[in-house]
Structures are given as C-alpha cells and as structure tokens.
Image (cartoon, helix red, strand yellow):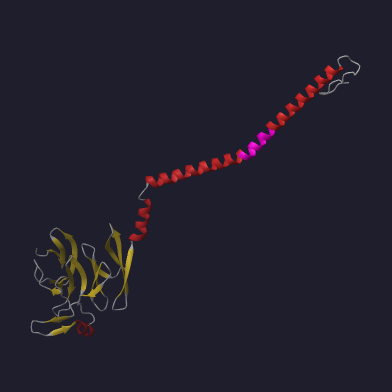
Amino acid sequence: MVGGDQMPKPSIFSNRYDEQMKKRKRIKIIFVVIAVVVLVIIAIGILGSILFGDNSAEKAKAKVQVEQNKKVNKTKIDNPKKDENLKEKDNSNKEYALKLSNGEEVKLLYNVVNNEKQYIGVMPKETKYTISPSKQNIAIVENTTQKLILIDINGTSKEITKLQYVSSKGDAFNEKNVLKSNPNYVWCDEPKFLDDDNIIYVSQLPWFNKPNIKYLWKYNISTNVHDNNLPSMGEISGNKIEYGNITSEGLEVIIDGVKNNLTMKK
C-alpha cells in the first residue's frame, strides 16, 4: 500500500535501482526545501507583524495626535484674542477699599479700558457719591459726619469739606459744632460733578434759622474754594433741589419743580 506522500521503495534487484534512488533523494530534497521556504515565509510574516504592527499603531496614534494639535493651533490662530480677552476679563474689574472717618468702609469700583483705570461705582449702593465725567475722580459724602471726600483714580483720598462758614458780620460757624448742636442740619449733601474741576452739593448754609430752605454750593478742585454764587444762575435756593441730566446746555437743576440749566463760564 502507498499512502499520503510516501513513494514505493525501488527493488535492489532492479537494473534501475541507482537511478530510482537518486530520483527519490532529489524529490525529498525538493520537499525539504519547499518546507523550509514556507516556514521562513511564515516566520517573516509573524515577526513583521510583531515588529511593524506596533510601530504602525504608534504611527497611527502619532498621526491622530498631530491632527489634534493642528486643530488646537488652528483654533488659536482663528481666535488670537481669546486668551487676551480672558485675561482682560480677569484683570478688568477691580476695587479700592476705603475706611471713612465715621467707621464705615466703602469699595470704589473701577475697570481698566485701554490700560486706563475708570471708576464705575461705589459699594454699598446707598453711599452718596458722584463720579467725574472723565471717570478719574469720585466724591463721597459720609453719613452722619457729612464730610465731603475726594478720591483720585489711584485711591488717594482727601477731605474737601467746607469746615467753617464765616458770616458777613464775621461770625464763624464750625461744621462739627453746628452738627453737634443740630444733627439734622444739612451741611453737605447730594454731591454732583458739574465737570472735572467742579462739584456742586446741597447745603442749608448760609442760614441756620431756615430749616426748610436749601442752597446749591460749588466746590472748585483747582482753587479749593467753596462758593454759593454760581455762574449763570447766582444764588440758588429752594425747598427741594434735584439734579437732571448733563446736556450741551449744562446740568439740569430742578428747583421746586422748575428746571434750570447750570453751566460753567468758559
């Protein structure tokens, strides 16, 4: 019986015995060579898969990372001001804390526009204050003491209250003494910037025996002078004094319901 790849062995008595044995040997050699070649090919394939497969995975991973980096860089290029805007937002809103002589603490709020500080408000909200048109100064009236405080854009404060009133007869009236004897007296109230150099405010000065009448006073920052004889309007008095808008004609001042325009002489 001959089975599989087995070949019949030649008879030693055959006159072709040597020739058949050589042929049989050549066939075995061919089979061995083929088997070795197949094994080598398989081994190369397996080894290549191990060596280059991981490398391909790494390349694919690196490619994905490169694509992601490109997207991030593109986003930064498309939005070059995004990070700057975030920084400006973080740094734009700031405040100064100011301790007043009456023991109260107020916060002066400002932001930064084009690298320039600008006042935007005061906390707490019930604080009586005014901001200059240039937003570089704030004036505050303290509760109870009625002190008028001027604060520049760097947070430096100074008191600008009219500390004493001298009558036409030469009698001097000290602010502290007047308020001590009459706590309801209005020495200084409702400040309002007329322009960057002038602040107006409401007071019962120059009278002490007319509790229902109030007068409009002006303080000039450059000269440090208080005056109740106002340009274009003279002496202004009434039971109720209110402020309107600042227009091209000046500040609207409503005296007992009647509107007037207060301007500074140029």
Asked if one can make out residue 257 in the rendered structure from this viewpoint, the answer is no
Q: 169 or 25, which is in the foreground?
A: 25
For the residue pair 39 and 189, the one nearer the viewer reads as 39
Specify start and end residues of the magenta stretch as a single range: 42-51
Q: Position of residue 71 (x, y in %)?
A: 44, 43
From this view, report whether residue 83 is shown above or below residue 21. Answer: below
Q: Nearer the viewer, residue 243 or 209?
A: 243
Using the rendered view, name the quadrant where residue 113 is placed.
bottom left
Please give left or right for residue 42 compared with residue 129 in the image.
right
Is residue 40 found left or right of 19 in the rendered image? left
Q: Position of residue 72 (x, y in %)?
A: 44, 46
**Residue at the image point whose x is 33% and y is 62% from the top:** 93
Q: Residue at x 37, y 59 (%)?
A: 90
Q: Is residue 40 visible?
A: yes
Per the picture, the main secondary structure of the magenta-coloured stretch is: helix
The reply, left or right, for residue 128 in relation to residue 204 is: right
Residue 187 part of the magenta segment? no
Q: Where 60 sits versus 141, above or below?
A: above
- Judging depth in this view, the residue of 232 and 93 nearest the camera is 93
Residue 48 shown in magenta? yes
* Residue 75 image position (x, y, % from top left): 41, 45
The C terminus - image quarter: bottom left
Identify the image quadrant of the N terminus: top right
Judged left or right of residue 50, residue 197 is left
State the image coordinates of residue 35 (x, y, percent, origin top left): 74, 28
Residue that lies at the very extreme toward the right in this rendered image: 13
